[in-house]
Image (cartoon, rainbow, N blue to C red):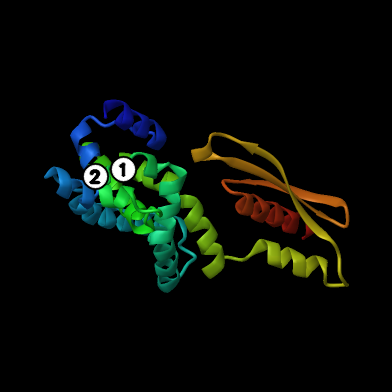
């Protein structure tokens, strides 16, 4: 078990002082019931509140161009089950959860279980350290989601604007190419290039392919002004 917990700590980039707290965070109710121990349900409750607060604070400080309703929509996207599930997949949570026999034998690992476990781990990190440490963990995993979502509700979609500008006099071929991919899986950086009818316009970087392409489009628009 010790090796399993240590491997998980490497995945999430945080080493627990209280290993028992981490064990509880990874313990599903099905396993807890079979072994008469605490599950991660209470940690999920706390983690949900911490996640909402940190994401709200980040949006308030960094996206003041968004209206209150728009910030609410972006936050909802960042903290929803689908987003948490993606984080769990990225950090291989399914390899480390303590599940009961009924869940282990299930052919599909439930999305809700994985999403809830992310909230439980968030609470565990907070209780084991402080708000600044857990903020770093949260933002490293949701900043990209917030950035993409903010483009959908409030900010300009630079790729669309660029396309409209370039095609004002007729159809042209706009192509985006990913030039480079750097960094570990949990902290990727992509470089994208945009060209029009074979002519290179600009390049940009981002934490996802979509964001890199968006940045390339933004830079191209600046050059075309």
From the viewer's perspective, is 34 left or right of 204?
A: left
| Residue 205 spot, x, y in % from top left | 64, 45
Work out whether 173 lies above or below 93: below
Work out whether 181 lies above or below 39: above
User: Which of the two residues, 199 or 13, is positioned nearer the viewer here?
Assistant: 13
Residue occupying the point 63% across, 65% down: 157
Judging from the image, what secondary structure is the residue with disc 2 in?
loop
From the viewer's perspective, is 110 left or right of 158?
A: left
Please tell me which of labels 1 and 2 falls first in the chain: 2
Q: Which residue is mark 1?
A: 97
Q: Are marks 1 and 2 in contact (CB under 8 Å)?
A: yes
Q: Which mark is residue 27?
A: 2
Residue sitting farthest toward the left = 36
From the viewer's perspective, is 49 left or right of 9?
A: left
User: Which of the two residues, 169 or 12, is positioned nearer the viewer here?
Assistant: 12
State the quadrant of the N terminus. top left
């Amino acid at each position: 078990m010790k090796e399993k917990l240590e491997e998980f700590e490497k995945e999430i980039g945080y080493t627990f002082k209280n290993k028992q707290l981490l064990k509880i965070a990874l313990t599903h109710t099905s396993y807890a019931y079979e072994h008469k121990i605490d599950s991660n349900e209470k940690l999920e409750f706390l983690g949900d509140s911490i996640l909402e607060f940190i994401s709200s604070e980040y949006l308030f400080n960094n996206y003041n161009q968004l209206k209150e309703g728009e910030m609410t929509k972006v936050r909802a996207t960042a903290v929803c089950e689908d987003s948490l599930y993606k984080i769990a997949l990225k950090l291989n949570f399914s390899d480390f959860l303590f599940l009961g026999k009924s869940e282990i034998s299930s052919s599909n690992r439930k999305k809700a279980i994985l999403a809830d476990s992310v909230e439980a781990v968030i609470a565990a990190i907070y209780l084991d350290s402080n708000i600044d440490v857990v903020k770093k963990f949260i933002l490293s995993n949701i900043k990209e989601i917030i950035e993409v979502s903010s483009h959908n509700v409030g900010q300009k979609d630079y790729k669309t604007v660029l396309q409209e500008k370039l095609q004002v006099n007729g159809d042209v071929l706009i192509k985006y190419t990913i030039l480079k991919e750097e960094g570990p899986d949990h902290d990727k950086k992509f470089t994208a290039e945009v060209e029009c009818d074979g002519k290179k316009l600009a390049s940009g970087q981002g934490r996802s392919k979509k964001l890199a392409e968006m940045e390339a489009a933004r830079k191209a628009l600046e050059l075309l002004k």
